[in-house]
Image (tube, grey):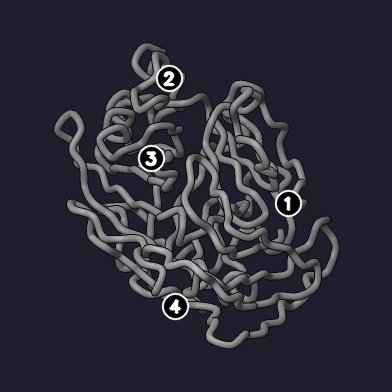
Amino acid sequence: MVVVLALALGTVLSRPRLASSTTSATTSTLTSAPTTTTIAPERPQALWSVVSHSSRGVMVDYRNVLADGVTFRVLRLRARTTLLRWHVGSGDPLNWAQAPRDAGPAIDWPVEGPAGVVAVFNGGFRESSHAGGSMVDGVTLAPLVRGDATIALDPAGHWAIGTWGSATFPGPGFVVSAARQNLVLLVDHARPTSRALGAPWKFWGDPLNEVPSEPRSGLGVDAAGNLIYVATMGHVLAPTLARAMVAAGVVTGMELDINPYWPILGATFTPLHHPGNYPVQLPMAQHSPTIYNTGWERDFFVALAEPNQWGCDWSASGIAHPGVAQAQPLRRQGAGCHAHP
């Protein structure tokens, strides 16, 4: 998987950039370019508590929202200051061993550490649930399903969420290098979908011991294109999760994993360049997010910091095919440009 941290401005579902980035198959580069305009940083906002920031402004913030009397933890990744990568688990998807090494069951610290890990969170249902397909670095691990809710990532770690196969998703010029599907959309046009409100409860996942109300998690984008993770360890049905996502600002969203064992969230106050702790977590979760530092059985997402200067590009080597040895990323630093905040 090739990673590029790129100069970015604004977003709808994916982020247009002021200057195009190039990826490298064998090296990691860090360069600076002069800028002639003043770019406003990402600002703190009312009701949100800042978790991490750089000279670009806020990277990650969080808040709690209520839906049907249940408290949900909400974590937001700012689109202009963070990027996202998807990792397989050590047991799921079933073809996980075919994934590129830097998308394996643990954070790849040599590749992802130079940028700095700022957040981690769980993925979706097991492949055996038939909730959708997955792809990483162009390697299809489970066939993608037309009509399913999908988070797509481009080679630079920018994201888009929508319905796979629709005319408007993932958007013009968006090159999909990774995709993770899970059922159909839970939120669309800032409202719970008719399926969210009307489908039989078992459509939204096989609950533990056949008890419909379970801990649930979801992922969406807001009107600015920021990525929003929403979860609770309270026992809820899918409509309540959908309403919580709307309360958190989600305009397009999908369900992630459910049941007490699987929702996991972590965010750190400063980017991690080596294994460390995540002080902001999902209250009452059964696992520490530090499991992602060394390896986990299920798929998950890793959020990284963009460079701290708007004129910086940083790229890390990846591999395009399984079985190819991972090249150790090199790192070069241009004048006034730093790899991490």
Residue 114 x, y percent position in the rendering: 57, 77
Q: Secondary structure at mark 3?
A: loop
Q: Residue furthest bottom?
A: 335
Camera-nearest residue between 12 and 218: 12
First in sequence: mark 3 or mark 1?
1
Which three-letter amino acid code belongs to the residue tagged 1?
A: Asp
Q: Residues within 10 Å of mark 3 (few under 14, many from 20)?
A: many
Q: Give the Cα distance between marks 3 and 1.
A: 26 Å
Residue at the spot 31% in from the left edge and 38% down from the top edge: 249
Q: From the viewer's perspective, is the residue at label 3 or at label 2 nearer?
A: 3
Q: Earlier in the sequence, mark 4 or mark 3?
A: 3
In the image, residue 175 sits, relative to residue 241, either above or below, namely below
Expressed as whole percent of the image width and height from the top left, the position of residue 283 reads: 25, 53
As drawn, is 133 to the left or to the right of 327?
left
Q: Which residue is mark 2?
A: 202
The residue singled out by tag 4 in the image is 341
Residue 222 shows which numbered tag?
A: 3
- Given this view, does label 4 or label 2 mark the residue nearer the observer? 4
Circle number at residue 137: 1
Q: CA distance from mark 4 to mark 3?
A: 25 Å
- Please identify, in this view, whether the residue under mark 2 or under mark 1 is nearer the observer: 1
Quarter of the view holding residue 142: top right
Tell me where residue 214 sits by quadrant: top left
Q: Where does the image place residue 229, in percent across and percent down from the top left? A: 38, 46
Lower sequence index among marks 2 and 1 = 1
- Dot 1 or dot 4: first in sequence order is 1
In what quadrant of the picture does the N terminus appear?
bottom right
Which three-letter amino acid code belongs to the residue tagged 3? Answer: Asp
Which amino acid type corresponds to the residue marked 2 in the rendered image? Lys
**Cα distance, mark 1 to mark 4?**
27 Å
Q: Tell me whether the residue at label 2 lies in contact with that at label 1, contact meaning CB atoms closer than 8 angstroms.
A: no
* SS class, disc 1: loop
